[in-house]
Amino acid sequence: MANNSPKYIILLGAPGAGKGTQATILREQLGLAHVSSGDLFRENVAQQTPLGVLAKTYMDKGELVPDDVTIQMVMERIARPDCARGVVFDGFPRTQAQAQALDVALAREQKHIGAVLLIQVRDEILLERLTARWSCPVCGAVYNRLTNPPRVAGQCDKDASALTQREDDKPDTVRRRLDVYRQQTAPLIEYYRGKGLVRQVDGERTIEQVTAAVIQIAQTL
Ligand code: AMP
């Protein structure tokens, strides 16, 4: 890394662009905390917390969970000690209000976002990827029937659990999520371009090639 100050990196891109996959690798290779708002919501849904019960009503439709609860949940997460060494944000921020809340929270601690990595993938490929995505309900490992299949069909490589499909990866909900991305999240590209933070990454290459590009940028920060 270029220096030892904490790195705050945002992975921006449509659902299915590979943000979660790359964030997991960045966590392992660079020692950053991985903050995924989608994972935080799914944990709350699994534990049936009041936040999870509320979030599920939006997630099942492919809509965004309201900003106030989302911002509060992520702010509590980034206050935890593992985030002091730096964070890779995956799926947050997704609206202008969330982006501004993050700016304010980081500035309060004299921290700032190092880069916004825009992972670009065409819509037809996103649709194909998301509807072929299966994951392990136990360890969270993500597979793709077409591009990254498990060694044994339907079974997790790591713990042999039966793989499941996310409710919101069903085709109609996927289409809604892509619309929501275009309408509510894509405008953030201009927001961060205005701050000179956006770095484009071709997300249609192999996982390893995308990782190499992402790590190369992260190491310059
Ligand atoms: P993801 O796993 O990032 O695709 O998120 C799954 C779902 O969780 C989304 O479709 C939203 O319903 C909800 N969600 C995740 N992150 C956010 C966010 N930053 N703002 C609002 N809703 C979110």
Image: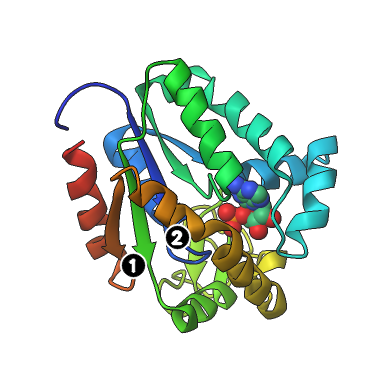
Drawn side of residue 170 relative to residue 142, left or right: right
Drawn side of residue 7 relative to residue 48, left or right: left
At x 40%, y 44%, the residue is 10
Q: Is residue 162 visible?
A: yes
Residue linked to disc 1: 203
Give the number of the disc on residue 13: 2
Say which of 64 and 126 sits in front.
Answer: 64
Mark 2 is surrounded, within 10 Å at the Cα level, by few (under 14), some (14 to 19) or many (20 or more) other residues, namely many
At x 85%, y 45%, the residue is 53
**Spot occupied by residue 42 in the image (x, y as percentages of width and height):** 68, 47
Give the number of the disc on residue 2: none
Marks 1,2: beta carbons within 8 A? yes
Give the residue type at disc 2: Gly
Nearer to us of marks 1 and 2 is 2
Question: Is 5 rendered above or below residue 156?
Answer: above
Q: CA distance from mark 1 to mark 2?
A: 9 Å
At x 51%, y 24%, the residue is 105
Question: Is 47 rendered above or below residue 151?
Answer: above
Mark 1 is surrounded, within 10 Å at the Cα level, by few (under 14), some (14 to 19) or many (20 or more) other residues, namely many
Give the residue type at disc 1: Gly
Residue at disc 1, secondary structure: loop
Which quadrant of the figure contains the N terminus?
A: top left
**Spot occupied by residue 169 in the image (x, y as percentages of width and height):** 64, 70
Instruction: Find out if the beta carbon at label 1 lies less than 8 Å from the nearest ligand 1 atom.
Output: no
Which quadrant of the figure contains the C terminus?
A: top left
Say which of 23 and 157 sits in front.
Answer: 23
Drawn side of residue 114 relative to residue 187, left or right: left
